[in-house]
Image (tube, rainbow, N blue to C red):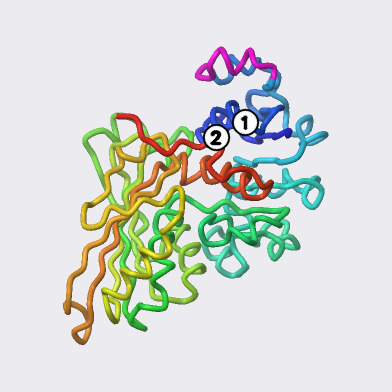
Amino acid sequence: MKATILGATGYTGMMLLRILASHPEVKCLVASSRGAAGRPLAEADPGLSPAALASGRLSPVVLSPAEALEDPGDVLFSALPHGASAETCAPVLGRTVVIDLSADFRFRDAGRYRSAYGADPPQARFQEKAVYGLCERYRESIRHASLIANPGCYPTATLLPLLPLLPHLLPGAPIVVNALSGITGAGKKEVINLLYAERTENANAYNPGRRHRHAAEIAEQLGGETLLFTPHLVPLKQGMLVTTTVTVRDASTAVDALDSACSGEPFLVLTGETPPETRHVRGTNQVRIGREVVAKGGYGGEDILILMSAIDNLWKGAAGQAVQNMNIRFGFDETAGLLREADL
């Protein structure tokens, strides 16, 4: 098959390139970037292996978006910023399978998108046609989708352990999420707050409560539950760790529901009462999920369940999940091209 990547020189786009360059089903891979158009691919991404560059499967030159969209192939990955992604992809929407890694098609509720991003959803007529690409939750819908909205990294790490517990939550009790992200989660941009001197030996919360854009995305998937979401920047290049505290009617039943939801899933790893660590998922598509029960410690004597999840934000939080979506959509082995064992 032929795959095209828009935004191939950002962190997510470069990770997509490296995953797809060795994917067994991808025979032709085109890289596109506004800033690097016309440059040799080997120069635009020096990290690509000589074997990949010599395979004949990769376009030797980075194309402009207009050039790439003339023949996007079987699947188009868009790793462009929100707003720009939907407008750039507009000419091929409905004509080829699009996996969009921006927020442009993640919302059913236009009001939530407007509140989070300060504008109306772009290409609004396609919003209802998009499938939210949380693979383990919406696998059957993804199989038939022509437009897949790849979730954000914070929502992925938060929702995968949390969604199976929705029927077991105490109504009205808040869901409290504290999330730690590596610097690449902010994208590749020149911002003082992301400089090495600013981030090393430093950690901070930002946009607490309901102010972060991904809080709106998580809340929509939760269907109206009370969410308090506080993200943090920590001095890591890659990695994300999320701790979620919920009140449940019965912890034993809730834990059984979590175990059942994760059973048989190739990338979900339960660690029991052992807290997961970011180093154990680095460079993989894994989600490692731990839990701790605080019996009879909640409102009215209900149980409290603490969920802990770790992902690599560039893999399961972005490029890896996008490839997993491609595998599901085209009927490939769902794990094709995706690592499950972390480097030491």
Q: Secondary structure at mark 2?
A: loop
Q: Answer with the quarter of the image where residue 297 lies.
A: bottom left
Q: Are marks 1 and 2 in contact (CB under 8 Å)?
A: yes
Residue at 71% from the left image edge and 57% from the top image edge:
144
Residue 19, above or below 246: above
Query: Which residue bears the numbered disc 1?
Result: 24
Q: Nearer the viewer, residue 124 or 144?
A: 144
Label 2 neighbourhood size at 10 Å, few (<14), some (14-19), many (20+)? many
- Point out the residue furthest to the bottom here: 300
Q: Nearer the viewer, residue 328 or 218?
A: 328
Where residue 134 is drawn, which disc sits there? none
Q: Which residues are drawn in magenta?
A: 46-56
- The quadrant the C terminus occupies is top left
Is residue 228 shown left or right of residue 336? Answer: left
Give percent across and percent down for residue 92: 79, 45
Residue 58, above or below 218: above
Q: Nearer the viewer, residue 241 or 64?
A: 241
Query: Which residue bears the numbered disc 2?
Result: 337
Residue 244, above or below 146: below
Residue at 75% from the left image edge and 63% from the top image edge:
125
Residue 175, above or below 316: below
